[in-house]
Image (cartoon, rainbow, N blue to C red):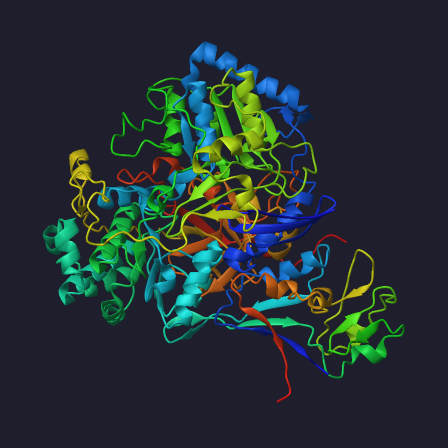
Amino acid sequence: MKKYMLHLNTRRCIACFGCMVHCKVNKSLPVGPFLCDISCTPLKMIGGVPKTEITFSACRHCEEPLCVPVCPTDAMVKREDGIVYIDQEKCIGCMACKTACPWDIPVKNPDDGKAVKCDLCMDRIDAGLKPACVAKCTTHALQLVTLETV
Amino acid sequence: MKKSVYSICGMCTVRCPIRVESEDNKITWIEGNPHLLGGALCAKGTAGQALLEDHERPQQPLIRVGARGAGRWREASWEEALDYVADKLKDIKKNYGPESAVLSSRGGPWQQMYKAFIHAFGSPNYTNHDCTCGRNTHHASLSINGVGRKGFAYDVKNAKHLVLFGRDMFSALRIAENHQTLDMLDKGGRLTYVDVRQTMTGAKATRFFQVRPGTDYALALGVIHQVIKQGYYDKDFLARYVTGFEELCTFVEEYTPAWAAKECGVKEKDILAFVEEIGADRPNVIFHPGWNLARYSDSFYASRAMHILNVLMGNIELKGGLFIPKGAGDCGKKGIRSIDCPKPDIKRGDGVGWQYTHFEKGPGLAHLFFNHMLSEDPYPIKAWIAMRHDPFSGMPDPEKQKLAMDKCDLLVSIDTNYSEFGWYSDVILPESTYLERDNFIVQQKGLKPRLTLRRKAVEPKYNTKSSWEIFTELANRLGLHDTFPFKTIEELWAWQLEPTGYTMADFDAKGFIELSDSPVFYDRDKLDGQFKTPSGKIEIISELLTKTGLPSLKPFVSPEAPEKDMLRLIYGKVAVHTQGHTTNNPMLSELMPTNTAWIHTKKAKKLGIQSGDLLELSSADKSYCATVAAHVTDHVHPEAVFTVHGFGKEIPRQTRSFMAGVSDQKLMIGALDNWDQAGGGVNLCEIFVHVKKSIRNTKRRVEL
């Protein structure tokens, strides 16, 4: 069952791109891949002020992830708490996951040729910490939301 | 082995408090100090790790072997390089006197060490980058309030309305201040932003004025007019602490909102509505008096107008307003000791203090050195030491600067990175990155003042040294032991803390020592003595300016319009770079490898340009040009072309940033001599450049 979600409070987000760097440095990724993305729509006048809409995107950790069944080596795994991650030992870098994903989320790590994507920093979550993008968000705009059944 | 240290970031000069984790001498995590920032850190802060690992920074001392700027170096040991610098300095001192050495730095909390070094050497010529930054604001504050620009701080969090003239705070990223502003907005506060283009700060604003370049002062005058007309000022505060209000009323009579609207190219009804807002929000309205307000020929007066607006709001020394930063003494505590050496009683080489008597002597004005160097008046300058300062990037017209620098027998760059100046210098002394160096303890004034310090998280990766080591070792070679008697940083810390009763262990819990548990405010009815003007009052008509023959209230002069085929050059910042310091950082150059030229849609149409097409920007005299992609938008003033500062560097060892984009300062031919005679700042936005569609937009391919 899906338990976590990354939520961006766009009122506080200033599109400083901190999350993208916090993430890739924490994952020791080289120049090239990013596991999350901040994008801004072109400025548009709203009430006399040119405004932009900011979007944060990263792996959705789908309820029924299409990337999991297509992985030929069972490297793509969905955990109990809904986190979808790649077992780096098993990954062969075929990128079938990327093809299956509607949002092209998995990317290739040029350092080892394997697929890599957001795993919500599950090592940190398991240690009682927040994902890197949330923990260090410059303005505390990004939040890790725990979904609960009411 | 795992380690965690509290320290101070060094990726930009905000110097946010951080906590750094490492394992076996490798950084594993950097975050904002959880006790102050809740972990928050910007992209630049995290990219500190990439700076540390970067092989494209100087890895050992370098001594020039080719012509200046040719990029031919030989590697030297520290012994040899320090001996080389010390011997040259001794020769220069013997032949020309100690005053012929200049030391420039970025400024900041540790500058007293650099200053003490050059003073101990015997030279009065310490300078910093402030002539291209806060000098106008500083002198404006001194003329009105009798205290410098740091004589007030801002309780933004509790304000109801923050007004920013061109201060793009969400690109500057003082994280604590950003939190305060967003908290204020979350509570329903208002943010008014004034600029010639839209920025992320403006995009968060509740009101935005896109003004014609060079008309900030006009807008401020129109607002003052209406504030007075509507009676939206604190009569009691004015009566108690302020002189010159009557003169102000007479002066602003002609500067109506209708007039200001016309000058600025905004709507009168918007100015009127804005004044109604501040009328309702006062006294909790903060007019930020400007940060990098070294822009137009009247920036000093624009800043004065913003200071005056604060005075009218009566927002001084109250919650949600301006407050006087408190130090150890205000908390009934003893302060720390600091390295110090009095300034030698010799005329400064930049003319400040004798040729220009109305400026604060402090760091003088760096740009005024160059003409004095060329004419060798009042004496020749033979050495320039740049301490993590890049005059060729930070100040305009580097080619003019080089003519003056060529008069020197010794140019030294102490820096973690190669800088444009460093590349031209004779010796590069590589400083360890901020993650690899300790520094002395500093006091941070505020409502709750603190002691804090930078501490190394890991040992240096390359053969680099901390600045305190470099200066101590140079001082030892030059016989300046009296000022630099310590051998280790631990000795220095112990000496600094001795009068306070604190020990280094007191920093362990949070990385800082808080000197007060609760915010310290002065009694608002007893502020006498806080305003260090000649009269002891806040002076709208400044005695000091009058004595110098300068007006306190200067009539507005409409800015010049660009000639045909030219635009006014405007520069600015971006959240992912600290100007030229980071443009070669692998992580940050990946986010923004080059800059663009913002151009208004109508102008672009005339030039036949669309976003992404290449534009050619060349200086008025055509001695410099660069080709960059156009960013076509309605949200930059049609008279302006905007670009992000810090690009267009020409250092081949920095492969990521080499020749990437356009350098605004290289376009600023002659700008060193175009400066504000009243405020001392360089007029960095009084430059017009040729803009045309580049011939390189061809789609044809003639090669195989």
Residue farthest right in this picture:
A73
Residue farthest bottom in this picture:
A150
Q: How many marks?
A: 0
Q: Can you say whether B15 is above or below B161 in the image?
A: above
Q: Quadrant of the C terminus of chain B?
A: bottom right
Residue B74 showing in the rendered view: yes
Q: Position of residue B297 (x, y in %)?
A: 30, 45
Instruction: Determine which quarter of the picture holds residue A89.
Output: bottom right
Residue B575 showing in the rendered view: no
Relative to A4, B681 lies left or right: left
Q: Can you say whether B108 is above or below A45 in the image?
A: above
Instruction: Determine which quarter of the picture holds residue A31.
Output: bottom right
Judging depth in this view, the residue of B212 and B170 nearest the camera is B170
Judging depth in this view, the residue of B263 and B170 nearest the camera is B170
Q: Position of residue A122 (x, y in %)?
A: 72, 68
Judging depth in this view, the residue of B159 and B665 nearest the camera is B159
Q: Residue at x 49, y 18 (%)?
A: B480
Q: Position of residue A13 (x, y in %)?
A: 51, 67
Residue farthest top in this picture:
B94
Q: Can you say whether B543 is above or below B200 in the image?
A: above
Q: Residue at x 62, y 64 (%)?
A: A133
Q: Position of residue B214 (x, y in %)?
A: 31, 53
Relative to A129, B493 lies left or right: left
Q: Residue at x 17, y 58 (%)?
A: B255
Relative to B592, B515 lies left or right: left
